[in-house]
Amino acid sequence: MTNPKTSLSVKLYKGDAKVLIACNLDKKDCVNLAGFTIQCKAATLKPYYIYNMLQFKDPAQHAQVATEPAQSSINAPFQKFRWLHVPGIIHQQEKVVYGTYIYTVYPRYFENNILLPIDKTLAVIEEIEVNAFAKGPIELAFTRGFTQSQAFTRHFGPKAKFKPYQAPLLFNPKTPAGTNNLGESYTYEDEYKWSGFTAREKIFDLVKSVVNDKDLFLDLFAYDLSEPDLLRYFLQLGKEGRIRIALDSADLHHNPAHPKAEDQFETAFRQIDSRPGGKDSIKRGQFKRYQHHKIMLVSRGKNRAPVKMLSGSTNFSVTGMYANSNHVIIFNDTKVVQLYQQLFETAWAGELKLNTFLTSDLAKKEYAFDLSGIPMSVTFAPHEDAFALANLQKIVTRIEAEKSSVLFAVMGTDTVTHGPVAPALIKLHEREDIFSAGITDSTNSLTYYKPSSLTGIRVTGLPNATILPPPFAEETPINIGHQVHHKFIVCAFNTPQAVVWLGSSNLAEGGETENGDNLIEIHDQEIATVFALEALALVDHFHFRDQHEAPKKPKDKNVPTPVPPKPIAYYLYTNGKWAASYFKTGDLHCLDRKLFA
């Protein structure tokens, strides 16, 4: 939408329970631009201004609305041309309200370096539906994954943990977990609901639907398996003979001398099922390296009629659902569910072993579907070497041919991750002809924004301890192994040629030849946009933190750790110079504005 009085235009992009607000102005209207004030009218709630952490150094010198907090964007406009609004971080803290959201965006201006009062005649108003994302037979959902963030620290304090020390397998998440900075107590379940976000909702809704309908049956592929309330449901279904579980048996999940969580669950499951042969409703295996699928299959009746299935990168564990950044995808399509049922039966009959699976057609083919006009395909690992390499090279070929944008969030691109994808993602950021931004947990070949440069951005989700400048509170990283557990790549954002690869595959040749995995390819502009927004959120978030790492301790114990300089406080600019890079040819900010706005 545009405003005829100015050149301001606003585009809204639909994510999973979130919205990207992208603004644009002619360069002539950016003289003395102070930023953008954004008001949100969310469904039945009263209108509110979205908050901005940054403020003016001396707010009293600028036009301020006394009834609004200092961080309200009416008092502290956003000095960026796009902003990702994630309801539930500050406003709507209990649960995101779904429905029609009306956004009103105001350009703000300085006069003699002083912020002027808001001019409501310059507003652009646009609306969009905000909900857990669904299109046709496909549903998407995501964990929050921002344990190292101001929002998580504000909700749960800097010393939060995700489970009690030496907690038993089936501990009660309603147990008090701690007290936040405001003195408010919270439980582990409170953490789980906030951190698990829509992914937790979708996973539990699916499992509860099976528990509550005695005619439904659940087949489960699991890698990590430790979420206590999910385990209780699985044990209940085991007792009723309505579940089969294919569970990883690699060393990190199996240790007879010191049983892992998965070992403890296996023992409990075999004990609880008293039916003849019921103890055989769980199988352990690892193909060659890992049983790496994270899949739930729902069927009905004795004939196991297909109902729905869930896949993605999210492990059914405390870490996977509440600490990692992850996604799930649900298919409500009979043919897709039937194919995944065939996958389960084949792996089950083959005892989750490599050689028996490699002889099946599932390991050798790409399966294509048209889901109500959404082209999609899927491949199932492990594969023979040649097929695995060709499968990954297909992605690389598309990345190298891309003329618009590539955004991604993948777990690793270090030397351990072999195959063609990791080198292609590293080399990608040398290009100046496309917009590229991505995040991994690897710390090699990181690239940050450089003024007057078009090279892309690649950050890590596992920075060293940070020393953040005021007004940011210090954040304590939680020891979670991985922050970025996603495995997705988006090409050609916001174009009809958009494509996204997702699923459980780590996009590495070793995994594609040795793991039980599924790699999904979807050609759809709206679905690709949802994933692109998740990548943007992570890249923006950790780009700032990566640049404020604390000095690392020297390897030589005799060398003292460098004393970091006192961080300089961040304030909003008091002139329009901040916007110059967004209109400078040869600057990534300019490419960013053109791509999104």
Image: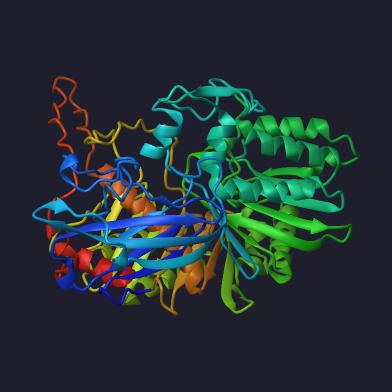
Coordinates of residue 246 in the picture (x, y in percent): 69, 47
Quadrant location of residue 395?
Answer: bottom left
Position of 423 with respect to 134 (left or right) is left
Q: Looking at the image, can residue 330 be seen?
A: yes
Coordinates of residue 575 in the picture (x, y in percent): 12, 55
Relative depth, front residue between 241 and 539: 539
Q: Looking at the image, can residue 149 be seen?
A: no
Quadrant location of residue 99?
Answer: bottom right
Residue under the image location 69 percent in, 62 percent down:
340
Coordinates of residue 492 in the picture (x, y in percent): 39, 73
Position of 163 with respect to 561 (left or right) is right
Which color scheme did the rendering employ for the protein?
A: rainbow
Count of marks placed on residues: 0
Relative depth, front residue between 164 and 124: 124
Quadrant (top left/top right/bottom left/bottom right) for the C terminus: bottom left
Which residue lies most toward the left here?
112
Coordinates of residue 405 in the picture (x, y in percent): 33, 70
Residue under the image location 36 percent in, 45 percent down:
461
Which residue lies most toward the right here?
276
Residue under the image location 31 percent in, 50 percent down:
73
Quadrant location of residue 360?
Answer: bottom right
Can you say whether 323 is above or below 520 in the image? above
Quadrant (top left/top right/bottom left/bottom right) for the N terminus: bottom left
